[in-house]
Image: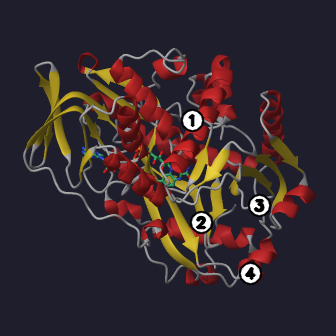
Amino acid sequence: MENPAIDPRHLDAIADADPYPYWYDDADEPDANPTLVRTESCDLCIVGGGYTGLWTAIIAKERDPSRDIILIDANQVGSAASGRNGGFMEASLTHGIANAQQRFPDEIPVLEELGLQNLNEIEAAIRRYNIDCDFERTGVIDVATTFHPSSYGDEMREDYQQLRSLGHNVEWLDRDAMQAQVHSPTYVGGLWRKERAALVDPARLAWGLKRVAESLGVRIFEDTKATAIERDGVGVLIETSLGRVRAGKVALCTNAFKPLLKRLGHYIVPVYDYCMVTEPLTNEQLESIGWANRQGLSDIPNQFHYYRLTADNRILWGGYDAVYYFRGKVNTELESRPESWALLSRHFFETFPQLADVRFTHMWGGAIDTCTRFTVFWGRAMGGRVAYALGYTGLGTGSSRFGGEVLLDLLDGRRSKATSTKFVQDKPLPFPPEPFRFIGIQATRWSMRHEDKTGKRNLWLRSLDRLGLGFDS
Ligand SMILES: Cc1cc2nc3c(=O)[nH]c(=O)nc-3n(C[C@H](O)[C@H](O)[C@H](O)COP(=O)(O)OP(=O)(O)OC[C@H]3O[C@@H](n4cnc5c(N)ncnc54)[C@H](O)[C@@H]3O)c2cc1C
């Protein structure tokens, strides 16, 4: 998609949108929990109340109901990525099959098996605990369009062959078959990955997990930021703004935020992703695009869009820009980026010109924790008393449950099929320090955009490939 001046009609379409996540516009948002203002003790302290922290808490209680657990969050549970994402819940633990092929080729069968098991476990937990989060196991279609080089379609066909050989339920859609699913003048084909992906309301999922954790006895404190971590006899001491937690073990689940263990800052960078939601579509508007099977859709360039229907038939439309701010800044002001929203608006109407009258009602952004292997990694510190899981790189809605489960295995010294994989044992390569970090990320973004236009990987991307740092979305 080229980038000439934005058409004023595309700006009009976003002019009245509220700059906060659509998912929070919900009467069922839970009340805030108290702030920790004294010293508390527990067996396990979890820092971070997104999906990773919440699943860690729930699985820990399911394994041992007598374990005393405190979860603290600097803000509110689900206020960061977990409550504001696109709601695409994929079985893949590796950020797709192409990334798995590049980095973990020998472990693909076991990782695919663990990934499917993880998605099934999430679905089972949603039913077991009665979490009302609009879970729909519709699958996802990777869409080939006229906006990117035809060689990308060939790569998608390779993915299709590989997924079939792994026994996945996938369907190749030629132009007519793709148009029969969803109508856009830009679509030339698609790869429908069935069963291994679902859609959810992400905030309702986070709130539901909070309720479950509390019902199992987890004590949750909000507006409670951990400011320091240190050894404390045989345990660990977490300092917070107004109190402290003495814990036997600590799980760090802080995603893209500044890590408590300084060395983790070498492995992750916060990258901002932006998205928006339309008003509910009328029946006529819906008919003009089809989409009866309600799959999640995602196009296939390096700079890709993801989009889906919500329960009330709005379209969530996001992606494309992925913005790194110098020195890895993370703050709420960066959740707004009008130029990204304007570009997204334009791409939306190019994809669905039949929806010319539709307006956007919400637009927002959030930080994703990018690492050089583009998928979650784990580690331990302080003699095994502390463990962490982070680095999901924008695909953690499903894999964060697996992240929490493995994190707990590491803390408990429990050997499992997962912990014996190199996928769990290995770490990503670190990022260079600033200013090389910023320059490197900008060069990569520029080169990927160039590849999306020309189909050619330039010298910079080929060098990254040789170093094992290349990304093939
Ligand atoms: C706009 C957007 C769209 C996305 N779309 C998708 C998608 O469709 N599918 C998908 O799979 N993934 C998507 N993602 C990524 C996905 O949301 C994340 O991978 C996932 O939510 C990570 O969960 P988490 O618990 O690790 O992190 P988070 O949800 O970020 O939670 C971390 C928590 O830690 C807390 N915290 C941080 N530091 C401290 C501290 N010092 N003390 C106490 N608490 C602290 C924060 O307040 C926060 O609540 C998207 C992300 C964004 C931003």
Give how far across and how far down residue 447 sits, in percent: 61, 44
In the image, residue 215 sits, relative to residue 339, either above or below, namely above
In the rendered view of the protein, which quadrant contains the C terminus? top right
For label 3, the residue is 293
Q: Distance between the Cα atoms at labels 1 and 3?
A: 24 Å
The picture quadrant where one finds residue 259 is top left
Q: Of callouts 1 and 3, which one flags the residue occurring earlier in the amino acid sequence? A: 1
Name the amino acid type tagged 2: Leu
Q: Amino acid at mark 1?
A: Asn
The residue labelled by disc 1 is 118
Mark pair 4, 3: CA separation: 15 Å
Q: Earlier in the sequence, mark 4 or mark 3?
A: 4
Residue 303 location, x and y as percent?
62, 51
Q: Are marks 4 and 2 in contact (CB under 8 Å)?
A: no
Tag 2 or tag 4, which sits nearer the N-term? 4
> Looking at the rendering, in which quadrant would you find the N terminus?
bottom right
Q: In the rendered image, is residue 84 in sight? A: no
Q: Nearer the viewer, residue 265 or 30?
A: 30
Which disc number belongs to residue 393? none
Q: Amino acid at mark 3?
A: Asn
Q: Toward which corner of the image does residue 90 lie, by quadrant? A: top right
Q: Nearer the viewer, residue 235 or 61?
A: 61
Number of other residues with Cα within 10 Å of mark 3, as a class: few under 14, some 14 to 19, many 20 or more: few
Q: CA distance from mark 1 to mark 2?
A: 25 Å
Q: Amino acid at mark 4?
A: Asn
Residue underneath mark 4: 283
Q: CA distance from mark 1 to mark 4?
A: 36 Å
Which disc number belongs to residue 316?
A: 2
